[in-house]
Image (cartoon, rainbow, N blue to C red):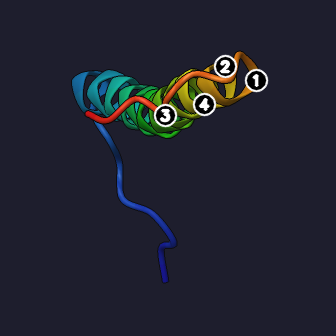
Amino acid sequence: MALSKPLSRRGFIIGKYLGVMIAVTLIFLILGAFFLNTISYNTVYDARESSKDVPTG
């Protein structure tokens, strides 16, 4: 019983590329959401610290 079937060089390279790109895209989305959340919180925090009205929008 064979555990894997032969894979062409092209298939191997495309698979490696897609695997790396999926990982990079996932990290980019997670860190981007974290960054946007942090920036939006920072605006509200700065407004509270300077005793101004909390910005809306």
Marks 1 and 4 close (CB-CB < 8 Å): no
- Residue at 67%, 30% in the rendered image: 48
Query: N-terminal of the two: label 1 or label 4?
Result: 4
The label nearer to you, 1 versus 4, is: 1
The residue nearer to you, when weighing 35 against 31, is 35
C-alpha gap between disc 3 and disc 4:
16 Å
Marks 3 and 4 close (CB-CB < 8 Å): no
Q: Position of residue 3 (x, y in %)?
A: 51, 72
- Which dot marks residue 38? 4
C-alpha gap between disc 1 and disc 2:
5 Å
Q: Position of residue 46 (x, y in %)?
A: 66, 19
C-alpha gap between disc 3 and disc 1:
10 Å
C-alpha gap between disc 3 and disc 2:
9 Å
- Residue at 32%, 31% in the rendered image: 18
The label nearer to you, 3 versus 4, is: 3
Q: Position of residue 10 (x, y in %)?
A: 23, 22
- Residue at 37%, 26% in the rendered image: 21
Residue bearing mark 3: 54
- Residue at 32%, 42% in the rendered image: 7
Q: Quadrant of residue 26?
A: top left
C-alpha gap between disc 2 and disc 4:
12 Å
